Amino acid sequence: MKAEIVTIGDEILIGQVVDTNSAYISKELNKIGVSVHQITSIQDERVHILQTLKEASQRAEIVIITGGLGPTKDDITKKCLCEFFGDELIRNEKVLKHIEYLFDKYIDTPISGLNRDQALLPSKAIALHNEYGTAAGMWFEENRKVFVSMPGVPYEMRGLMEREIIPRLIKNYARPIILHKTVITYGLGESAIAEKIESWEDNLPVEVKLAYLPNLGRVRLRLTAKGDNEERLKNLIESEISKLHHFIGDIIYGYEDEDPVEVVIGRMLAEKNWTLSTAESCTGGRLASKFTKAPGSSASFKGSVVSYSTEAKSEILNVPEEIIKKHSVVSAEVAKAMALGAQQKFHTEFAISTTGNAGPTKGDSDAELGTVFIGIATPKGVSAREFNFGNHREKVIGKSVNKAMELLQESIIKVRDDI
Amino acid sequence: MKAEIVTIGDEILIGQVVDTNSAYISKELNKIGVSVHQITSIQDERVHILQTLKEASQRAEIVIITGGLGPTKDDITKKCLCEFFGDELIRNEKVLKHIEYLFDKYIDTPISGLNRDQALLPSKAIALHNEYGTAAGMWFEENRKVFVSMPGVPYEMRGLMEREIIPRLIKNYARPIILHKTVITYGLGESAIAEKIESWEDNLPVEVKLAYLPNLGRVRLRLTAKGDNEERLKNLIESEISKLHHFIGDIIYGYEDEDPVEVVIGRMLAEKNWTLSTAESCTGGRLASKFTKAPGSSASFKGSVVSYSTEAKSEILNVPEEIIKKHSVVSAEVAKAMALGAQQKFHTEFAISTTGNAGPTKGDSDAELGTVFIGIATPKGVSAREFNFGNHREKVIGKSVNKAMELLQESIIKVRDDI
C-alpha cells in the first residue's frame, strides 16, 4: 500500500521552517506497513495545490496533506479541497463546539467569526477530532483513494495521526508488514564497511534491503524486510545480523529499533539504578537536552553544568585553577576534573564531560580548532580522550555529542559486565 | 527564476532522517532572488528518480538534487544522472587527488577501490569542489536548464552551496530581489491578530505578501516583497511595518531578518557588555543549547546549571531547602531562587530559570501537568511568573523556551532603557 505526503505552506519553500512533520508521518505509516513513495512540499497556491493532489492520487492510494488550515487568509487548503472534490463547505456543529470549548478554557482573547469559520468543512469530509487545536482533520474517500488533511502544527498533527488516522488505516486496509532494524557502528567509514561486508551484502535474501547511513563519526546500517509473515521477517533479519557479526562484530555498538542511543543509555542505567550527570563546555547543553527529551528521564539523569566560561569550570565544577593554568582549559586533565566535579556535585555513578574548541575562532585556549577532550567518570575511575573533529563548528559539536554517547555506552557496559 | 529541490534517499521516506537540507537550500536561494517552487523527496529508485528529474525540469529552470552520492551500492544518483543526460562516467583526476588527500589526512582506514570510484563523474558535469567530503558536487547545463547534484551530508552540502553554487548562480543569472521581514508578536492568537489588522492586510501593496506563522505561544508575521529595486522594496516593507504598529504595536516584540531571537538577545547583551546564565529544570538544557549554538556566543553566555533533581537545586544553585519544602519544587519562590543562584554562581548580570512539570507524569511536585514557573534575575531584582502550557510534554518544553526568551528580552530592554 503506497502513500504520498503533500505539505502545503510558503514557510517551508522559503526555508523558514524545517518540515519535521513528513518524517514523523513517514515513520508512523511505515510501522503499519504503508510505504511512503514521495513527499512533496508546495506553496499556498491554488493551481499548484490542485495539480499536486491530482498527481499524487494517480501514484498512491493514500494522500496525506498537512498545512494551510489556519483561520487566516493565507490558508487556502480547505477551499482547494472543495474545488478538487467538487464540494462545498458546511458547518460542523461538533467541531464548532470544540472550538468554543478551547477558547473558553485556554485562550484569553474572545472567539471571533474567523475562529468559528474553522468549523466550516467540506460536506464530503469526515471530521477528525483535533484535541489540541481548532483546525479539525478531514478524511475523504473517492475512487477507492483516501485523502487526509491535517493542520501543520506538529503536536496537533501528531495527535490526529495517533488517535484518528493510524487506527482507521489499520482497521480498514490490509497491509504488508515492514520491519526495520538498524545496526549502529563506530570507527570505520562506509566504504571500508562496504568492502568488509561485500559478500554478505551480495547474498542478502530478496526480502531484505540494506542502506548505509553515515553521520558524524558513526555509520548506521539499516536492514528492511517486507512481507506477510512477521515471524519469518523477524527471523530473517536476526539471522542476517548474526551473520553480519562475523564480518564487523568489533565495530557494532548497538541497535536501533525505535529508540535513539540516549534512550538506550537511559534504560541501561535505570536497570542498574545508576544515575548520570554531564559537565559540558563545547557541547553547550546538547547532551543534557538529549537526555531530558524522553519522558521519565529524570529517573537516571540528574543534571548538567554547562560551564561556558573558565571561571565556571573552577568555581562550580571545582576544577583546580592550577590544573587549568598548567594544562590549559582544553586538556585531558580539565576534562577529567570536570567529569569528577559533575559526578560529585550531582551524586551520580557516571558523569561525562566535554571541553574543546568548536571554532570558528579560538576560545580561552591555544588548542587547535576542532580539538575536543571527552572525560568519563565511572564508579571505577576517571579517564579522558582527545579527538580532532575538524574545522566546522557544527560538525565539531555534533561529533562531540555522538562520540560522548559512544564512550559513555562503552563505559557503562564495561562497568556492568565488569570487563 | 524558479528552482525545484529533489532530495533522494530511502531514509527520508521512512522517516529515519528529517530533511533539513531543503530548508537551508530554500533559504539561501531565496536570499538571491531564486524562489523554490517545489521540494520533492523520493527513494533511491531508478525509474522514480528519472521521472522526477524530468517533471522538475519541466516546471523550473534550476533543479537542485541532494543525496545518493555515497560510495556504496545503495547510492545510485550518479548512474541515474548518466542515464538522464545520455552520458558516461569518466575519472576526474583533481577529484581523485582530493579524495586521496582526505584519506591521508583525516581517515584511519586505508583508501579502497570504492573510495577511488567516487572520482568517476559524468563527462558532461563540471565538478564542484567538496572541501569536507569525498563526494564531489556536479553542475550540468542542458537546454538552458541548470541541474546541480550534491551529497546529502548537511555540512558538505552547505559548503558546496556557499562556495560553489550560490556564487555561480549570482554570476550567471539575472534574478529579481526578494526581501523578507518577520515581525514577532507574543500574546494574541493568529485569528485575533487577523481581525485587528484586516484593513491593513486588505490594503497591502501588490508587491507585498503577508503570512501568519503561529508557533508555541507566539505568532510571527512575515512580509515578503519581490521586485527589481531593492531600495524601493525595503522602503515598502518598512512603511507597511510602521503602519502595522498602529494596529498591534503593543504585542510586537521584535523582528527577524536573518537572526533567531537568541542571537538578537546575544547582541543586545554584548552591546552593553552584559552576561547571561541559565538555571534549567523542565527545559533540560535547551536554553543553553540555543545560546551556545551561534559562534562567538561565549562573549555573553557564561553557562547553565541543569538541575533535573531536587538536590541539585539546593546543592548547586543554593536554593534553600526550606523554600523547596514550604512551596514545593515547582513554585515561584524556587524559580526566583534558581535564577538568583545562577546569577551568583556564574557572576552574570542576567539569569533565567525554569521549573515545571512537563509530563507525561507528575515529577517531584504536586503541581498540575503543564505548570511552569519562569524566573528572571536582573541587576534590578528578581521576579517569577506562572504559566500553564498544556498537557503535552513537547509543547510544554517548547512553550517554556519561547516564553523564557520573550521575558528575558523584555527584561533586558527594561533595564537597558531604564523603564
Image: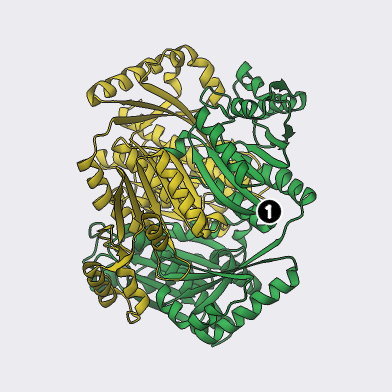
Chain colours: A green, B yellow
Q: Is residue B218 left or right of residue B121?
A: right
Looking at the image, which residue is at 42% across and 12% down? B203
Question: Badge 1 local density, few (<14 within 10 Å), some, or many (20+)?
Answer: some
> Can residue B285 be seen by looking at this rendering?
no
Looking at the image, which residue is at 28% across and 30% down? B177
Above or below, comparing residue B189 to residue B98 in the picture: above
Q: Is residue B178 left or right of residue A239?
A: left
Q: Nearer the viewer, residue A42 or B268?
A: A42
The percent coordinates of residue A5 (x first, y second) are 58, 45
Above or below, comparing residue A293 to residue B254 in the picture: below
Instruction: Specify the subunit that label 1 lies on.
Output: A
Looking at the image, which residue is at 23% across and 46% down? B168
**The disc labelled 1 sits on which kind of residue?**
Met
Looking at the image, which residue is at 34% across and 47% down? B348
Considering every residue shown, the one lying at the far front of the view is B86
Q: Nearer the viewer, residue A114 or A230?
A: A230
Q: Is residue B195 left or right of residue A272?
A: left
Disc 1 target residue: A1
Secondary structure found at label 1 = loop
Above or below, comparing residue B1 to residue A62 in the picture: above
The percent coordinates of residue A252 (x first, y second) are 52, 78
The percent coordinates of residue A27 (x first, y second) are 61, 55
> Can residue B71 be seen by looking at this rendering?
yes
The percent coordinates of residue A291 (x first, y second) are 53, 60
